[in-house]
Amino acid sequence: MKSIEKKHFGVTKKGEEVFSYILKNDFLEVEILNFGGTIRRIEMPDKNGKIENIVLGFDKIEDYEEKIGIHFGAIVGRNAGRIKDGELNIDGIRYQLAKNNGNNNLHGYPEFFASKIWNVEPFEEEEKIGVVLTRVSPHLEANFPGEVKVKVKYTLDKNKLNLEYEGIPDRDTYINLTNHSYFNLSGDFKRNIDEQELTLCADNYIEVDEATLPVKIAKVENTAMDLRRGKKLKEVFLSGDEQVKIVGNGIDHPFVFNKEYDGFLAKLYDEESGRTLKVVTDQPVGVIYTGNYVHEAEFLSKGVKAEDHMGVCVETQDYPDVLKFIPEKSKIYNKMNGYSQKTTFIFEK
């Protein structure tokens, strides 16, 4: 059994209609908003068959608008992460971006993709169902160069949610997109993520400074960031590691993926519920963010009080601030060389 249902969700302050698209099959129920391409709910059973939501979100469009910087479940763009000093240099031209995170630009402020109304087309393909979201990001939106035709496709395929991104610009530019879902496998946020176990196929991670800008690629060995054999997240939070303390007592770091191990690059496991999330991607990096400032959301859906460490993000993307940090790995996109990436979330119990 599979179905796609469209429902009215609300109206933005600009008077824009917001709709939710509910994708449902025998394994999962996924709700996606045309506002920001936001994944508002993912409902799945636990080991006893109890169906609960495993991603953080809000009940009202007003909350998504007012707390847009938290990016619950949204498409992030034009750039995921921070750009130092808000300076983007392409083809010898300097583009000054707005500064919304100290002296830096974060997530493409002020024209967050998370705040945009996307065009949505539902589709069915044999056992698969999904939605295709599109919008045109105009030249100099948030002062990024180039008009970019953006497409993000969400496909529900049995117990998998595939995310495919495309960006076709009309001139040289930089694009780096991701999804910002906060996962909590306990179900309906009944517990924080302290006891959930995270495993990463990553021998290296990127140390950051006080502004959470990349400093250097470092070995995870003999650090709190060694998650190769799996570790309960509370072990990281209680480690006293300087890199843990510098980002607000948690993780907010890029990890450089190795090859897949046992069918995943990242895995989150909750023993009590029996739920597992596996992540695979064609991107070089996964930024792990353990919701170190989720309290700023105040309340989550169903009136649950928001607290830090209520969810963990696996933001699959390019190297952070790559044009400055690792220029030899820079990728410039244009009409002959479009942007693309693919990430798959796999849910098991």
Image (cartoon, rainbow, N blue to C red):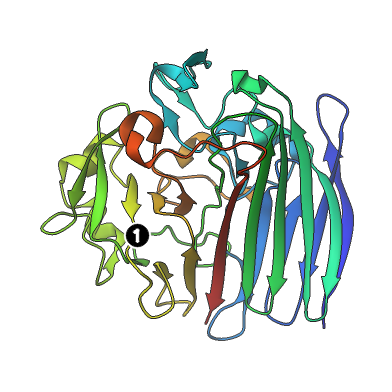
Determine whether 332 is above or below 120 in the image.
above
- Coordinates of residue 249 in the picture (x, y in percent): 28, 42
| Nearer to us in this view, 76 or 336 | 336
Quadrant assignment for the N terminus: bottom right
User: What count of labels does the image hold?
Assistant: 1
Q: Residue tagged by mark 1?
A: 257
In what element is the residue under mark 1?
A: loop
- Give left or right: position of 127 versus 178: right
| Nearer to us in this view, 185 or 332 | 332
- Coordinates of residue 111 in the picture (x, y in percent): 65, 25
- Coordinates of residue 49 in the picture (x, y in percent): 61, 84
Can residue 235 be seen here? The reply is: yes
Q: Amino acid at mark 1?
A: Phe
- Give left or right: position of 138 versus 71: right
Residue 109 sits in quarter: top right
- x 30%, y 37%: residue: 247
- x 78%, y 55%: residue: 132
- x 10%, y 58%: residue: 222
Badge 1: how crowded within 10 Å, few (<14), some, or many (20+)? many
